[in-house]
Image (cartoon, grey):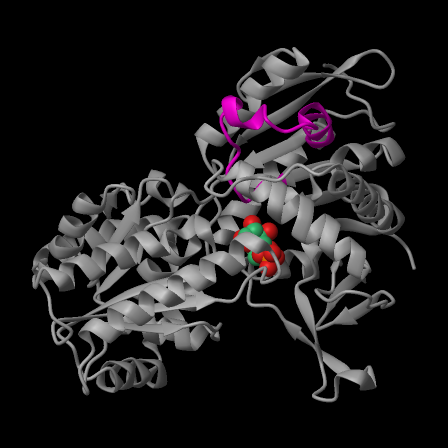
Amino acid sequence: MSGSEFVVVANRLPVDWVPDEDEGSGEGAWRVSPGGLVTALEPLMRSTDGAWVGWPGKADLEFDRFEFDGMDLVPVALSADDVELYYEGFSNDTIWPLYHDVIAEPRYRRVWWDAYGRVNRRFAQAAAEVAAEGATVWVHDYQLQLVPKLLREKRPDLTIGYFHHIPFPAYGLYSQLPWRRQVLEGLLGADVIGFQRVADAGNFARAIRRLLRYETRAPHIVVPDADGGTRTAVARAFPISIAADSYIDLAQRPHVQARAAEIRASLGNPSKILLGVDRLDYTKGIRHRMKAFGELLHEGRITVEDATLVQVASPSRERVGAYMQLRDEIELTVGRINGDFDTMGHTAIRYLHQGYPRDEMVALFLAADVMLVTALRDGMNLVAKEYVASRIDNRGVLVLSEFAGAADELTSALRVNPHDIDTLKETIMQAIEMPPGEQSRRMRPLRRKVIDNDVAKWSRSFLDALAAARSQKSPRGRRARA
Ligand code: G6P
């Protein structure tokens, strides 16, 4: 097979392997994972005959390259050890907590780092094998920070982009990382390094200056080349978004609207429905929002007839200690609050430890009068944008943490510091009591923002920046001018 002109490299493939009931049979089927990245990149993958390099999501599964729904997929196998050390360990117990401002304590283990290097090399090798001469390769996220450098060493002819979907922390925290230089050098293998927020790109540039002493002048970083010269990498913000159209389309469908009414009725038609939708992750501030809600009930400022909180918490990283502990804490809290306040006909918190398909989510967004996004730290938070896009009636109130990347763009939301429980309570009351006129005055500009800046625009602007980097390269893969 000839090489691909466009290659995406991400920890996960856009499809998951779902084994048959009878697990031992080895049979099963591929299912498109609901993630936003697939939606963003699918059209591009088709128009460029692109390939996607990634993990099928289960340990010890060896698959050959295959085609799925017109996409060319290149599976990278991870052993049970790789999953434990590279995915659960270094990616999700070292980098994830460190990059989210140490909300949970990062653990620094040398065997995890070794596995991270080993697996990153495997991804780089797979990408190097499928990319055509002079191709564009787009690497995604914190699980693969070493891939850009490894790939450049193998294939200097390629144009390499990297997008960082999570925050990049301030230097005072980043500097804890025992492998802080290696990670920066890994990322600097890319021609363009994209971040969610201007502040993330700033933190990255500062870490470069402090640790590597390279010259930076935003958005440029002067990087020494293998042959003693220099090249210029670009590091700047490209805030990610959603396929707004598909949410609008679903929100207009009669069966989704009917489902929204059914959800309200099945909750006993409380006056207001508050909604939280998150992966069950300690960065999301789920406990903070439950604390605020529980106190409002305790104080009698609301009753379960006035307001029900629906909390969808999809299962995530369930073998990592901090996630197990969080689940226990949340389930204890839900049990206590419901035990104290539920009546036969109404519940305080409807807690759902499950994931749902997109049409069910849009029905929930339509049913929810108040959307609570109280993340303690979040790269972007696409749920906030999904809620806004779904509100075709220009109603509903978004309560949005200032620590979510989305706060930079969604400025007419009710902004909160989720650590400040008293103010969070006041903001929830303000949201519950907000008159319809004010709801729509706030919702309209939010919707404009999300509709005008959808995910197609995001990928286009990143790829335009990559194309600009590419046009400055000489055919042999080095820059004509630094
Ligand atoms: C975040 C990360 C993604 C990751 C997703 C789900 O959004 O930025 O890279 O894929 O969480 O986490 P998981 O560990 O299940 O892939």
Q: Vertically, is 97 above or below 81? A: above
Q: Where residue 380 sits: x, y (%)?
A: 44, 46
Q: Please tell me which residue lies in front, 472 or 441.
A: 441
Residue 185 part of the magenta segment: yes
Q: Position of residue 220 (x, y in %)?
A: 59, 19
Q: Is residue 359 visible?
A: yes
Q: Which range of residues does the magenta coloring cover?
A: 163-187
Question: Is 121 inside the magenta-drawn segment?
Answer: no
Query: In the image, is 308 to the left or to the right of 135?
Result: left
In this view, the residue in front, 96 or 233, is: 96
Q: Residue at x 15, y 52 (%)?
A: 441
**Residue 470, placed above or below residue 402:** above
Residue 98 location (% of width, % of height) = 55, 37
Q: Position of residue 394 (x, y in %)?
A: 21, 62
> Looking at the rendering, which quadrant does residue 416 occupy?
top left
Residue at position x 45%, y 41% in the image: 103
Quadrant the N terminus occupies: bottom right
Q: Quadrant of residue 54?
A: bottom right
Ligand 1 found in image quarter: bottom right
